[in-house]
Image: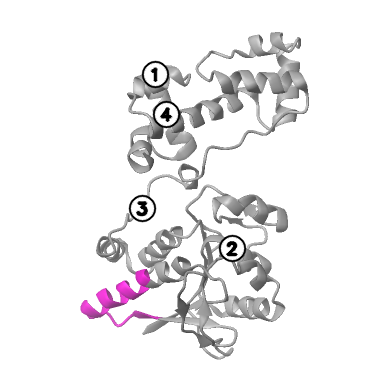
Amino acid sequence: MTRMVLVLGFPGVQALDVTGPADVFTTASIALRDQGSPVTYDLRLVSQHGEPIDNGVGLQFVSHPLPDAAEPIDTLVLPGGTGVHRATEDTDLIDWVRDAAGRARRVISVCNGAFLAAEAGLLDGRRATTHWAVGELLAERYPAVQVDADALFVRSSDRVWTSAGVTAGIDLALAVLEEDHGTELAQLVARWLVLYMRRPGGQSQFAPPVWMPRARRDVIRAAQQRIEAEPGLPHRLSDLAQEATMSPRHFSRVFTAETGEAPSDYLERVRTDAARRALTESTDTMPVIAARCGFGSSESLRRTFIRRLGISPDHYRKTFR
């Protein structure tokens, strides 16, 4: 049995959004044939007019016309890229996506290909992810979608999966391959492609340190500046409130309203970002970084990193230094 995998192409498609999942399914097919399995994947890149597709990196993809309604589809892959927003404005293309998704056993969006899935109504009322840089835009444009901009991939429903930016489409393809054929085959493909079977952490580890919103009130903005200038100091709520000539409860309420975070959460985020910079820009030891950034101990630093970024400080340093 051949499972048809259709990858939707359009001008400005991200090359790796196409080739990443394609390599996973193609490598799996080779392994399945070697094992004598009757089930393989038949991968086909399709576009609205079946023309060569420019992807913006000096290459062209050869594509097939969109199949008619009679052709069975196992997996529909919706990649992203710089042209995805133009593609969402093409009502004929979105109508085809909606119809093809209704016939497919499974739909996968890669990176900002989630905008195609959302425009077709496939993510309404469901949790979904996309590239960390456009998570807020997806949530703003499609308020019915519950956007999780940190996950590497999300099973949004029984039939729809969404993945984060670019290479996360490979992580998702390995996950659906594991669902189809088990862990052993997925591990074999991951080893062959020299990939993590399950990449540690979420998207936050790849995003730059978060820009902190500025408060409107001078006293709250001054508190922000004190925290950011010296993240290693205690910055007790009572001291911050006293500087602002407010009670601790009132200060906490005003600070949260102005910045979107409680003072303790804001302080922890500033300290985490300070530690991220120290880990990548210095050779200081973990105890030194933990003390300088206000964590007190290496263990406290480690727990915070795992909770916020999904990986340990050691792993973060090795990956991004």
Position of the C terminus, as image quadrant, is top left
Give the residue at mark 2: 114
User: Which dot, 3 or 1, sits closer to the camera?
Assistant: 1
Q: Based on the picture, tell me whether residue 25 belongs to the magenta stretch.
A: yes
User: Which dot, 3 or 4, sits closer to the camera?
Assistant: 4
Task: Work out how far the residue at label 3 is from the one at label 4, CA to CA, in angstroms.
Answer: 27 Å
**Callout 2 secondary element:** helix
Amino acid type at mark 4? Ala
Q: Which quarter of the figure has residue 192? A: bottom left
Amino acid type at mark 2? Ala
Vertical side of 190 occupied by 136: above or below: above
Provide residue 277's location: percent of width, then percent of height: 45, 32
Q: Earlier in the sequence, mark 2 or mark 1?
A: 2
Task: Work out how far the residue at label 2 is from the one at label 1, CA to CA, in angstroms.
Answer: 40 Å
Give the residue at mark 4: 278
Give the residue at mark 3: 198
**Callout 3 secondary element:** loop
Provide residue 262's location: percent of width, then percent of height: 65, 26
